[in-house]
Image: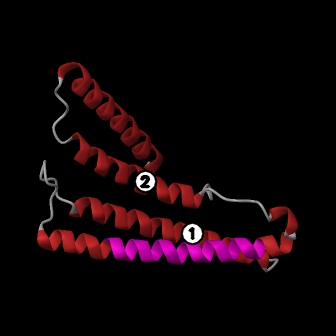
Amino acid sequence: MLGSIAALDLAAMMLLTFTDVMGRKFFSSPIYGAYEVTEFMMGVLIFSALPLVTAREDHVTIDVFDHFITPHIGRWQRVAVNMISTCVLAVLGWRLWVLAASHLRTNEVTMTLHIPHSPFTHLFAVMALLAAVASLVLTLQHLRRARGRD
């Protein structure tokens, strides 16, 4: 479901950008508010993909030292990395939730189209917290393997 949302969002963002550029180039008439809509669409793309990328452990990684690390140490390294990721994602989700509450309380909207910020920041907070849960599950799985129970 989240993968479909991310894919549809990306396709819509590309179509909007293409149409906006063509309108600006050939008709001297860009799409009114396209920049604001694109900003929100970028957030939806990033935060809808975040739980999936986390659950699949598809984040960008650097494996420069992996061939120096023994398999046993590597298992503990994955525990540590996932534990740190869980904490960072949980803090990100919490702070986004606080920001969303502020947006809701102050009725913050975009400058051009007056789109409310609150629904988007709430969505982003939930997706970050969902990614934190996925990371916690991975941490526990890697911990079980590192302790030799799997």
Q: Position of residue 58 (x, y in %)?
A: 61, 54
Are there few (<14), some (14-19), or many (20+) residues within 10 Å of tag 1? many
- Label 1 amino acid? Ser
Looking at the rendering, in which quadrant would you find the C terminus? bottom right
How many discs mark residues in the rendered view? 2
Residue depicted at x 23% and y 27%: 24
Is 90 within the magenta?
A: yes
Residue depicted at x 30% and y 44%: 38
Q: Position of residue 120 (x, y in %)?
A: 27, 59
Whole-number angstrom distance, CA of label 1 to CA of label 2: 16 Å
**Cβ–Cβ below 8 Å for labels 1 and 2?**
no
Foreground disc of the pair 1, 2: 2
Name the mark on residue 135: 1
Along the line of sight, which residue is nearer the eye, 25 or 85?
Answer: 25
**Image quadrant of residue 103?**
bottom left
Tell me which colouring the rendered structure shows.
secondary structure
Along the line of sight, which residue is nearer the eye, 105 or 60?
Answer: 60
**Residue 38 sits above or below residue 15 on the image:** below
**Residue 68 sits above or below residue 46 on the image:** below
Query: Element at badge 2?
Result: helix
Residue depicted at x 42% and y 72%: 92
Residue for badge 2: 46
- Horizontal relation, residue 33 to residue 56: left or right: left
- Horizontal relation, residue 115 to residue 21: left or right: left
Residue bounds of the magenta highlight = 75-96
**Image quadrant of residue 105?**
bottom left
Query: Element at badge 1?
Result: helix
Residue depicted at x 49% and y 65%: 131
- Label 2 amino acid? Ile
Judged from this view, the residue extending furthest toward the bottom is: 147
Along the line of sight, which residue is nearer the eye, 61 or 82?
Answer: 61
Name the mark on residue 147: none
